Amino acid sequence: MSFASLLLTLGFGFLLVLGVPIVFAIGLASIAVMWILDIDLVMLAQTMIAGTQSFALLAIPGFILAGDLMTRGGISSHLIKVSNRLVRHITGGLGMVSVLSSMFFACLSGSAPATTATIGSIMIPEMKKRGYPTRFSTALASSVGPLGQIIPPSIPFIVWGVIAEKSITRLFLSGVVPGILDGMAYMVVCYFYAKRLGLASEPRASLGELARTAWQAKWALIAPVIILGGIYGGIFTPTEASMVAVAYALFIGIFVHKEIRISELAGVIIQSMRTTTLVMFIVAAAAAFGWLLAYEQVPAQIVGLILKISDNKIVILLLLNLTLLLIGAVMDNLAAMVILSPLLIKLGAQLGLDPIQLGTIVVINFAVGMETPPFGYSLFVASAISGLTIEEISKGILPFFLVDFGMLMLITFVPWISLWLPRLVLG
C-alpha cells in the first residue's frame, strides 16, 4: 500500500480510537490524503454532493418521518396490543410480544434505533412488572431493534441498492424470509428462558377479544399492506412509497386516532430532519472516503490479499462475515457500507455471489452490529430506556447474538433463503 492509502485507513482508525465523531474522522482523513496527493479540495465537496444525488435516497427522509409520525400517532401501541393477544398465552409470551411487535413495526420504520426505542419504551417496563429480569428484557429490546433493518422497508437496503446499483425492491424482498426466521428464533429463546425461570403465561385471548383488538388496530395493520404491497405490486417505487407512508401516517394520526395535534407537527418534522441530516451527512462523507479508497486502488489490493490467504470459498466467506461483524461493532453501518462497497462488490464478483445475496449478507451483518458492544446504537437506546449499563446489557445479549450468527451462516451458505422470494415475486 502507498503512504496515502495507509494514512487514509490508519489515520481514520486512529481518529476513531481517539473518540472523534465518525463523520469528522472520515472528513479529516480524506482532507489529509487529498492534501498529500495534491488533489483540489473542491473534489471533496463534489464527491460528497455526488454521493447524495440519487432519487432513491429520497426514501430515507420519507421513511424516517413516517416512522416518527406512526409512533406519535399511536400506530405502534396498536401493533403491540395485537401482538399481545396473539401470543400472551404461550410460555415467554410477553417476550414474544416484543419480538412480534418489532416485526410489525419493522414494516413501517426501516430503522434499528427507532424500532428499539418504540418497542423498548413500552415493553421493557411491562416485562419488568411481570417478573422478567431487566437485563433480559433490555437485551431483547436491543436485539429486536435491528429487525427494522432486515424486514423491509429498510434504510440500509436503500443505501446498498443505490451504491451497488441493484434493485431496491429485490433487496427488500431478500430480507423478508431472513427477518421472519430471525424473529421466530428469538421467540424460541424467549420460550426457553421463561420456562427456565418458571415465568407464568397469561390467559389465552378469546377469538372475540382478538377480533376486537384487530379491528381497533385495523389502520395499523393495513399500513404495511399498502406500503409493501404498493412496492411489490409495481404501483409505486420505494421512494414514492415513503411519501405514501408519510401521507397515511398523517391522516391516521390527525383524523382517525386523533393523537397528533397540528401544533405538534413542527416538532415531529424537526426531529425527523435531525435524524435525516445525520444519516445523509454520514453517507456524503463516506462517499468521498470511498472515492479516495478507489482512487488509491485499496479495494483491489485488499481483495488480492484475502484471496492469497485461501482459495477456499467457505473460508473466505467466513472471514468476510467475521470482518463485517467486527466492523459493524465499532463503526456506523451506513458509513461502513459506503466505504467498503467497492471492496465488497469486487470480492462478491470474485466469489461468484449473487449481488442480491451479497447485499443481504452485508445488511444483516451490519444490523447485528447495531446490537453488538461496544458501539451498537440499539444498545445505547435500550440502555437509556432501562438505565442499565452497556456492560450489563451485553451479558444478556449472547443468546440473541448466537441466533443472529446462525442466520448469517444460513444466508451465506444457503442462497435460496434470501433469493427465493425475489425470484418468486419478480422472476
Image: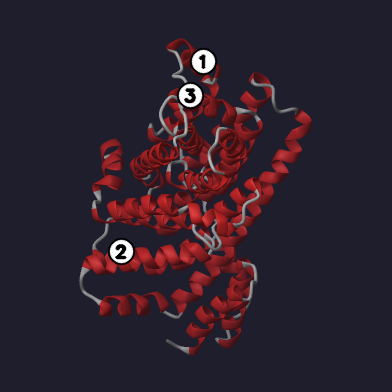
Q: What kind of residue is marked 3? A: Glu
| 343 relative position to 224: left or right | left
**Is residue 295 placed above or below 144 in the rendered structure?**
below
Residue 351 visible, this orientation: yes
Would you say the residues marked 3 and 1 are in contact, meaning their CB atoms lie under 8 Å apart? no
Percent across and percent down for residue 122 are 61, 35
Judged from the image, the secondary structure of the residue bearing numbered disc 1 is helix
Residue found 30% across the figure and 47% down from its top: 418
* Number of residues whose C-alpha sits closer than 10 Å to that of mark 1, classed few (under 14), some (14–19) or many (20 or more): few
Q: Residue at x 25, y 69 (%)?
A: 315
Residue 318: percent from the left, percent from the top?
30, 65
Earlier sequence position, callout 2 versus callout 3: 3
Q: Amino acid at mark 1?
A: Trp
User: From what the image shows, is residue 264 above or below residue 408?
Assistant: above
Q: Residue at x 43, y 35 (%)?
A: 231
Dot 1 corresponds to which residue? 215
Mark 2 vs mark 1: give the one in front: 1
Whole-number angstrom distance, CA of label 2 to CA of label 1: 46 Å
Residue at which label 3 appears: 202
| Place of residue 275 in the rendered image (x, y in percent of width and height, measured from the top left) | 64, 50
- Side of 372 relative to 351 (left or right): right
Callout 2 secondary element: helix
Q: Position of residue 107 (x, y in %)?
A: 48, 36
Q: Is residue 288 left or right of residue 308?
A: right
Query: What's the residue type where badge 2 is placed?
Result: Gly
Q: Would you name the residue on which mark 2 appears? A: 348
Compare residues 401 and 195 and report the one nearer the observer.
195
